[in-house]
Image (tube, rainbow, N blue to C red):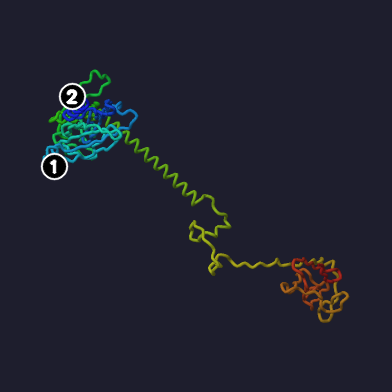
Amino acid sequence: MSAAFYVCLVLWCLQTNAGPTPAVVFVSGKGNLQDTVAAELAPPENLTLITLNTNYTLSWDWDQSFAEGHAVNFTTQYVAKFKLKSKKKSPVWQTACEKTSRRSCDLTKFNLYYLGIYVLRVQASVNERVSDWIMKEFCPDKDAAVGPPSRVDLSPAGSGLDIIISDPLTSANSSMKDHIPELNYHILYWERSVDTEALETQTLASKVPVVTLSDLKPWTWYCVSVQSRYDFFNKESSFTSPHCVQTEGAIPWWQIFGYFLLSLVICFLFVLVILCCSFWFFKTVKATFYPSNQLPTHFQYLYDSSGSDIPRLLTPDSDSELLCDKVTVCPEPLVPEIHIPPPEALPVPPSDSSGRHSRQGSGGSGDSGVYSTGCSSGLRQPDSIQSSSGDEDSGQGFLDLEQVKMKDMAPGLKTRLLIANEGVVDMCV
């Protein structure tokens, strides 16, 4: 039996008893031994849990020199610890992150039981090669950090302060007191001052979310910061950012009087502004709908006779005729002008037996040939004209005009009646 056989047998026994060791590859040829050692992948290192309330993130480190130029992936799994102790069946590992290139895995979304104990493991893989699993035990109740209060409100209560604390919240926005009933708060408060070295802080522990700080100075600024604590596992959160508020006290009388005067002035100015705005609005509306310029007098009939300022339309009905009077237009009557010479200049005409004066002229007719229109039926002989002969039988003057007829007289023409010395009546048109 050759020496090569013994060497192979020894190496096989060492690999079987010692566990994973660098693999040895033998290549035989012509009785010569060539071996090559290929190192296995190193597992992840420094498993660390980053936790806050119920937010859990597992992170790790890994030496990249083991797979230079190759992409490396990681797989993260978890299982409840009590399942590993079961002898009836092998535990079923739940995969949280599979073949991811990130060097962390978020476990928050799996809602791990806060009081449970879990075993976490991570494995690296490059191409077809895988590393060993590296494991870490995790108990949220013991290992998860507790966060500060989600909110702190301050309100003055006379010369004291009321502190209202909101519990830390889980990833589902519920109170952490659902998981940690013994959660309490550590309150730190101090008087605000410019000199930071002279600050004197005071502490107060409370298990209730509402705390009142009494015996403080009135009208003084105080700052408050709160911390969450879980004494069973000695967990402490960070302090919240300082919140400052001023305390109150008895208000002096001069300040009350000043506030009263200020309120009166503000009310007076407010009422004055309202009145000015109302007056301006009323004036604008009146000027718009009721202007000061009135209609001319010949348009006044358009308004209602009852005295209303609202104009009305004229309707073509029978009542519209009552709005005006009937007017009849006639031309100016023509009055003839008669020029009568004085009595001493007129000759005495002879009278006939009939007692009528004869007309002298070319016509021998007894009619004068001159007649008046329908509007003037005759001319009355003046009383001053009497017969020069003194004839008492005739009973009238020497000139007796029975009718003066104005024939075919056109309107607008002025007619003048002339009586000549011979007693002839002429019409000049």
Q: What residue type is labelled 2?
A: Gln
Compared with residue 326, is residue 82 higher up or lower down, i.e. above or below? above
Distance between the alpha carbons at the discs numbered 1 and 2:
58 Å
Quadrant into which the C terminus falls: bottom right
The image quadrant that residue 8 belongs to is top left
Q: Does residue 55 appear to the left or right of 87 in the view shown?
A: right
Residue 139 coordinates in the image, percent (x, y)? 16, 34
Residue 101 coordinates in the image, percent (x, y)? 30, 34
On residue 183, the disc is none
Q: Residues within 10 Å of mark 2 (few under 14, many from 20)?
A: few
First of labels 1, 2 by sequence position: 1
Q: Which of 304 and 56 is in front in this view?
A: 56
Q: What residue type is labelled 1?
A: Lys
User: The residue tagged with tag 1: helix, strand or loop?
Assistant: loop
Q: Name the residue that disc number 1 marks.
A: 89
Q: Does residue 207 appear to the left or right of 403 in the view shown?
A: left
Compared with residue 199, is residue 324 higher up or lower down, i.e. above or below? below
User: The residue tagged with tag 2: helix, strand or loop?
Assistant: strand
Q: Nearer the viewer, residue 269 or 78?
A: 78
Q: Nearer the viewer, residue 152 or 349?
A: 152
Q: Which of 210 and 371 is in front in this view?
A: 210
Query: Residue furthest toward the left?
Result: 87
Q: Name the residue that disc number 2 marks.
A: 202
The image quadrant that residue 124 belongs to is top left
Q: Nearer the viewer, mark 1 or mark 2?
A: 1
Compared with residue 324, is residue 218 higher up or lower down, i.e. above or below? above
Quadrant into which the N terminus falls: top left
Compared with residue 218, is residue 275 higher up or lower down, i.e. above or below? below
Residue 181 coordinates in the image, percent (x, y)? 14, 36
The image quadrant that residue 180 belongs to is top left
